[in-house]
Image: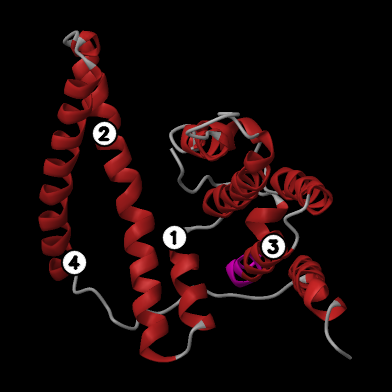
Amino acid sequence: MLTYEPGDSVGHRLDARSKLLLQASFAAAAFGHTDPVGLAVLTGLTLALLALASTTPGVVLAEYRGVLPFLAAAPVIESLRFGAPWVDPVAAVDPALAAYRTVLLLALVAAYVRTTPVRESEAAVARLVPGKLGRLLGLGVGLVFRFLPVLQADLARTREAMAARLGDRRPLRDRVRIVATAGLTRALSRTDRLAVALRARCLSWNPTPPEATFGREDALALGLAAALAGWAMWPAAATAPW
């Protein structure tokens, strides 16, 4: 389950703002360099960042095992034709590169979530976006990060209970209906309890944020983010009229 895992890796020691800026610049570089060479460079960088965050590629693949089939299906669907030659492999190249780019971005998201406490994410968003909008976005990020793992656990327990009652022998349509109905029911129930809990705990609109300091590792992360941002803008600068 994609949640925060305590640790002492470089990724854990970085300030949340540094990690958010690094992810933003990485995404810009991934969209600016969708060719195989650019994605190969980003793949090496992704593996290095995952190692610094004590997150293995196997963990990332396990976390996104429900998303990967859809990403793999996109190039196949794009290559199909309703007439001869029926299959056009060239048409699958761009969707395949885009799907692979998405996998790299999801890998960094997994590393961020596993190395960043929810409270630090809330504070980082509130600091990066000034005013009430930043506090509102920080509150939303905190609620999502806290609520989503609970819903995932509910769905996992529903599937386990269904399998214990030989529900896994039912047709696929019935299994999807049972899991979806149970998940929606639990989500609505938990939403009501969450609202009551927030009122009972006097949810603060402007809570005291945790202490945040930039260190040497943050300086290196920001330098890497700046380099990625510059690399992302390089194609546009190379084709500029000046």
Residue at the image position 77 percent from the left and 65 percent from the top: 217
Q: Is residue 161 above or below residue 92?
A: above
Neighbour tally class for label 4: few under 14, some 14-19, many 20 plus, Cα within 10 Å: few
Give coordinates of residue 99: x percent, y percent. 59, 45
**Circle 2/circle 3 CB separation < 8 Å:** no
The overriding secondary structure of the stretch rendered in magenta is helix
Q: Which residue is mark 4?
A: 198
Camera-nearest label, 1 or 2: 2
Q: Is residue 132 above or below residue 43?
A: below
Q: Which residue is mark 1?
A: 118
Provide the secondary structure element on which disc 1 rests: helix
Provide the secondary structure element on which disc 3 rests: helix
Camera-nearest label, 4 or 2: 2
Neighbour tally class for label 3: few under 14, some 14-19, many 20 plus, Cα within 10 Å: many
Q: Earlier in the sequence, mark 1 or mark 3?
A: 3
Q: Which residue is mark 2?
A: 155
Say whether residue 144 is left or right of residue 159: right
- Disc 1 marks which amino acid? Val
Task: Measure how far apart labels 4 and 1 are at the Cα level.
Answer: 16 Å
- Span of residues in magenta: 14-20
Give coordinates of residue 197: x percent, y percent. 16, 61
Task: Measure how far apart labels 4 and 2 are at the Cα level.
Answer: 23 Å
Provide the secondary structure element on which disc 2 rests: helix
Q: Nearer the viewer, residue 164 or 205?
A: 164
- Residue that extends furthest to the front in the rendered view of this protein: 84
Task: Measure how far apart labels 2 and 3 are at the Cα level.
Answer: 32 Å
- Disc 4 marks which amino acid? Leu
Give coordinates of residue 164: x percent, y percent. 21, 11
Q: Earlier in the sequence, mark 3 or mark 4?
A: 3
Say whether residue 43 is left or right of residue 7: right
Q: Quadrant of the N terminus?
A: top left
